[in-house]
Image (tube, grey):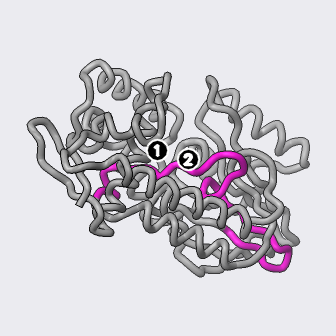
Amino acid sequence: MPATLGAVNVYLIKGPRGVGLIDTGMDDVNSVKELLGLLKKEGVDPGSIDQVICTHHHPDHCGIGKTLQGFGARVLMSEPDAGSLALFLSKPEMDRQRATFFGRHDVPDEFCDRVEAMFPFFRKLQESFVPDGFLSDAQIVDMGGIELEVMLTPGHTRGHICLIQRDAGLIFTGDHIIPGDATHVSMREEVHGTDPLGKFVRSLERVRDLGPMVGLGGHGEHMPDTSLRADQLVRHHRARIERVARTLDDEPRKVFDLSEKALGARKKVFGRWLAMSQTLAYLEHLVTRGEAVEVTMDRGVGYRRS
């Protein structure tokens, strides 16, 4: 991945009747060169790839969908995430609203300007394409003779999917579960009011209840026990929910202020924006549970305890 964004895992599936990919990497010259070089080392011609499954719509996971379609592959993802991708690419005029979370939240102008300026950068790392098909929960996908079971795991995105290979005891987790860090819950305009944090916790519990499996995530090393890791993340987010609840009092507060109080200071602007996004997910969840109230303020909305 370019700049200081790290690396993304792309998985090559070699079956008895063909080959496929899980995720793609970004639309970046060096990223594409790296992917093609690794395929060559494995003796795989890009034109022989039958199917590509994207776990979600972020550019590091489906950035070169159009290029792979050009090689002849069918590219599949969930329908909700295909919609989110189309919305992000087709509506750049909404970037300022995105910087203020749907234009509903009051942030300093300079902060808003700097966050808004980052979205075109991410858009440049993503090809525009239309998936060849949509994947749904419990669907079985044949990838070169290897069966993968789709599990819908919303939270990181509204249509994120994991892929289960039961015979091998494997689960490809995308960004739903990764080692080391707790997955960020994306608060885009299309998930406002749908309690994505609640859906995320429930989907973590689904993975936990599968029992121990080896997890192959979108970033980092493999995870020896996804049941254990999912349970850790459930407990992490439940503790964070309570921490955010404790920041509330009888006076409404802005998310910009609550996020720093609840999750700590962030030196980088985009990190602060992500912390706001995560705090907003917790706050909307608390509203859903009846433990917080959204209040209209002079500029935007705020939150107080119920």
Image mark for residue 66: 2
Q: Residue at x 44, y 57 (%)?
A: 242
Mark 2 touches mark 1? (CB < 8 Å): yes
User: Relative to the observer, which residue lies in front, 130 or 121?
Assistant: 121
Label 2 and label 1: CA atoms lie apart by: 7 Å
Closer to the camera in the image, 229 or 55: 229
Q: Which residue is mark 1?
A: 128
* Residue 225, quarter of picture: bottom right
In-image side of 266 versus 220 (left or right): left
Q: Earlier in the sequence, mark 2 or mark 1?
A: 2
Percent coordinates x, y for residue 134 in the rendering? 51, 69
Residue in the foreground of this view, choosing between 40 and 304: 304
Q: Is residue 280 above or below residue 238?
A: above
What range is drawn magenta here?
163-192
Q: Residues within 10 Å of mark 1 (few under 14, many from 20)?
A: some
Whether residue 86 can be seen here: no
Question: Which element is circle 1 on?
Answer: loop
Give the x, y percent position of residue 145: 80, 75
Q: Secondary structure at mark 2?
A: helix
Q: Is residue 212 left or right of residue 93?
A: right
